Image (cartoon, rainbow, N blue to C red):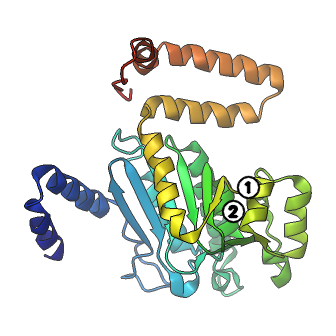
Amino acid sequence: MAAAIGLLAVAARGPSRLLRCRRALLDSRACSRGAAGARHPQPEQQLTICRQLDGIRTIILNNPKKRNALSLPMLKSLQNDILHDAESKDLRVIIISAEGPVFSSGHDLKELTDEQSQDYHAEVFQTCAEVMMLIQKHPVPIIAKVNGLATAAGCQLVASCDIALASEKSHFATPGVNVGLFCSTPAVALGRAVPKKVALEMLFTGEPITAQEALLHGLLSRVVPEEKLEEETMKIAQKICTSSRSVVAAGKATFYRQLTQDLKTAYRFASQAMMDNLATQDGQEGITAFIRKRKPVWSHS
């Protein structure tokens, strides 16, 4: 009812604005509303908030009272929101952010006691790994927008994203060693984002690093004042939306695949990827538009 009233309120401002509001409402309803049957917190709590407008999907971790811990229900909710309509041409970029002063504190340690079975523990770590790998395998760029503390698996989430922006007050840590549980799975993403010695210092000491240090070492793409974080993140997302979805998707897949190859193989693979790109409709459209000094009209296929 409240949503309907909101749509009526903007109708007078023009049909295009009303259409955008309707699309945002429908897209928001389509995203997951939290994992069903979650034990912690109560099932009715919306663990993630998912909205989409003009090609940009925003997923908000929404359990600030528990420091946005990546519990199994939270991980499944995040996974559902990332996967929803992943191949749709209307989806061009995803932003992951969080409610409250903590981006994510990592795993919910209450799930990792011996009160839970080893099968449950295995499911937690397997689901977490699936989410992190899904980010790199997803066809659209995924941006982390961090405004606070990101620790353990929360730091892993930031390291796994394609692009990461943070406010100046943000900090990052892998403090598992301090509670007797070494951050071995966060180390997979962290060790691929920052130099080895930086990663190992974080892992061995558990001490946090500042946003500026994270930027210096490659964990972040950009650090901005808190009041500019939303604006700067949206600038990047909107710029991505101006490009061909299919070209970006192919480029992302190529980038991650060549990283694991030796230099000669990587160049051979990337050269073929560029040949394949040239053979696409959008590949030729972009070049033709550039030569004729006009804006390209993308098919996104």
Label 2 vs 1, first from the N-terminus: 2
Q: Position of residue 29 (x, y in %)?
A: 28, 63
Where disc 1 sits, the SS reads helix
Displayed quadrant of residue 8: bottom left
Q: Which residue is label 2 attached to? A: 156
Give the position of the N terminus as an image quadrant: bottom left
Image: 137 above or below 160: above
Q: Kindly tell me whether residue 126 is visible in this rendering.
A: no
Callout 2 touching callout 1 (CB < 8 Å) = yes
Q: Nearer the viewer, residue 56 or 272?
A: 56
Q: Nearer the viewer, residue 167 or 298?
A: 167
**Residue 189 has which mark?**
1
Residue drawn at (89%, 75%), measured in percent from left and top?
205
Image: 222 above or below 120: above
In the displayed structure image, the side of residue 13 where residue 48 appears, left or right: right
Amino acid type, callout 2: Gln
Q: Total number of numbered labels?
A: 2
Where disc 2 sits, the SS reads helix
In the displayed structure image, the side of residue 255 where residue 290 appears, left or right: left
Residue drawn at (84%, 76%), measured in percent from left and top?
207
Q: Position of residue 46 (x, y in %)?
A: 39, 76
Q: Nearer the viewer, residue 288 or 28?
A: 288
Q: Position of residue 271 (x, y in %)?
A: 66, 16
Image: 287 above or below 52: above
Amino acid type, callout 1: Ala
Image: 171 above or below 291: below
Displayed quadrant of residue 35: bottom left
